[in-house]
Image: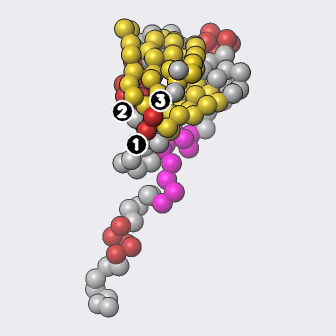
């Protein structure tokens, strides 16, 4: 093999690419900072998320494959929208949800987290907050 030609592996490896996590996943909350976030999004690669998980305030969680996602209905996506999966409808209510709505439509949200009652009062007025998640079998 010619020593002047770079190995294929070195061409494919990008600096910082191996086992990289999005910056928001690595960042630890600062002291006194509220750790509630309405949703987690981002991509480690150019691929869309495979599943959408819902973490409810009572600690339970349920995940759905984006492959079963048929669409979303909303009259005011900033406050409420309903996701339609193969065998379930999921109603999400809160405030400042326009960005969450848009990112779900792009299959870029990994997790939606419902706030408990105390978190609802601690979050800034302009921050997104998910107050209700209702999962119904269809």
User: Is 75 or 113 nearer to us in this picture?
Assistant: 75
Of badges 3 and 2, nearer the viewer stands 3
Distance between the Cα atoms at labels 2 and 1? 8 Å
User: Is 75 or 98 nearer to us in this picture?
Assistant: 75
User: Is 4 or 90 nearer to us in this picture?
Assistant: 90
Q: Residue at x 48, y 60 (%)?
A: 18
Segment tinted magenta in the rendering: 18-27
Residue that numbered label 1 is attached to: 48
The percent coordinates of residue 134 (x first, y second) are 58, 16
Residue that numbered label 2 is attached to: 106
Residue that numbered label 3 is attached to: 86
Q: Residue at x 56, y 44 (%)?
A: 26
Distance between the Cα atoms at labels 1 and 3? 19 Å
Q: Secondary structure at mark 3?
A: loop
Answer left or right for 58 relative to 100: right
Distance between the Cα atoms at labels 3 and 2? 18 Å
């Amino acid at each position: 093999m010619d020593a002047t030609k770079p190995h294929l592996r070195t061409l494919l490896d990008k600096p910082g690419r191996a086992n990289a996590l999005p910056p928001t996943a690595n960042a630890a909350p600062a002291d006194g900072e509220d750790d509630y976030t309405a949703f987690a999004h981002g991509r480690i690669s150019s691929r869309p998320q495979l599943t959408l998980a819902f973490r409810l305030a009572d600690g339970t969680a349920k995940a759905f494959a984006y492959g079963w996602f048929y669409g979303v209905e909303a009259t005011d996506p900033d406050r409420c929208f309903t996701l339609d999966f193969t065998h379930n409808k999921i109603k999400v209510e809160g405030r400042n949800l326009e960005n969450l709505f848009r990112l779900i439509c792009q299959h870029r949200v990994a997790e939606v987290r419902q706030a408990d009652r105390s978190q609802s009062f601690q979050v800034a007025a302009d921050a997104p907050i998910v107050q209700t998640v209702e999962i119904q079998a269809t």
